[in-house]
Amino acid sequence: MSKASNTILFFLLLGVSLSAFAQVIRPDDFREHYTLKQVVVLSRHNIRSPLSGRRSTLQRITPHERYRWSSAPSELSLRGGALETMMGQYFRKWLVSEGLMQENEIPAEGTMRFYANSLQRTIATAQYFSSGMLPVANVRIEHHCEGHHH
């Protein structure tokens, strides 16, 4: 395998600290031997409200008032959306610093793909991430079942 054909895949997995990737020490001639060709980000949804609602047995077994979530049961919360936008911004800044995209890039058709399963919390997470990463690109989030949003 030639050095020019090497592909470096970047995986973001839940629970893996980004700082661990930042601590990698590369030799000075690293960029002369390797070209980053593809970035793959795997992520889970951001902060969601509990799966059970206010009228559920779980919510009624105590007289104590529970936290009032900004979203319906199991949906992405407002805070989750804000944090996911920040995550997208982090990746934008990283990709720009690596020379892989422009600050306000609108990617060419087929060069970037945003895919989520068809739950509201995952579609919304992908939408917020794309808003932070590509704030002027108006990204379409792909998901399996169009119109299925719960």
Image (cartoon, rainbow, N blue to C red):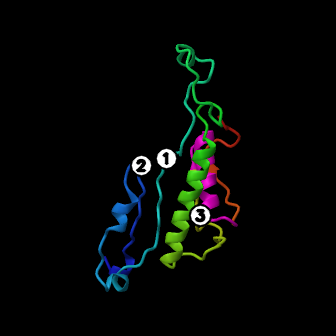
| Residue 123 visible within the image | no
Compare residues 24 and 78 and report the one nearer the observer.
78
Q: Report crowding for label 3: few under 14, some 14 to 19, many 20 or more residues within 10 A (C-alpha).
A: many
Label 2 with label 1: CB-CB less than 8 Å: yes
Residue 74 coordinates in the image, percent (x, y): 58, 33
Per the rendering, the mark at residue 14 is 2
Compare residues 64 and 14 and report the one nearer the observer.
64
Q: Residue at 41% across / 59% down in the picture?
A: 11
Res 27 quadrant in image: bottom left
Q: Report crowding for label 2: few under 14, some 14 to 19, many 20 or more residues within 10 A (C-alpha).
A: few
From the viewer's perspective, is 10 left or right of 133? left
From the viewer's perspective, is 33 left or right of 37? left
From the viewer's perspective, is 22 left or right of 85? left
Q: Amino acid at mark 3?
A: Met
Assess whether residue 127 is covered by the magenta stretch. yes
Start and end of the magenta stretch? 116-136
Q: Which residue is mark 1?
A: 44
Assess whether residue 22 is covered by the magenta stretch. no
Q: Which residue is mark 3?
A: 133
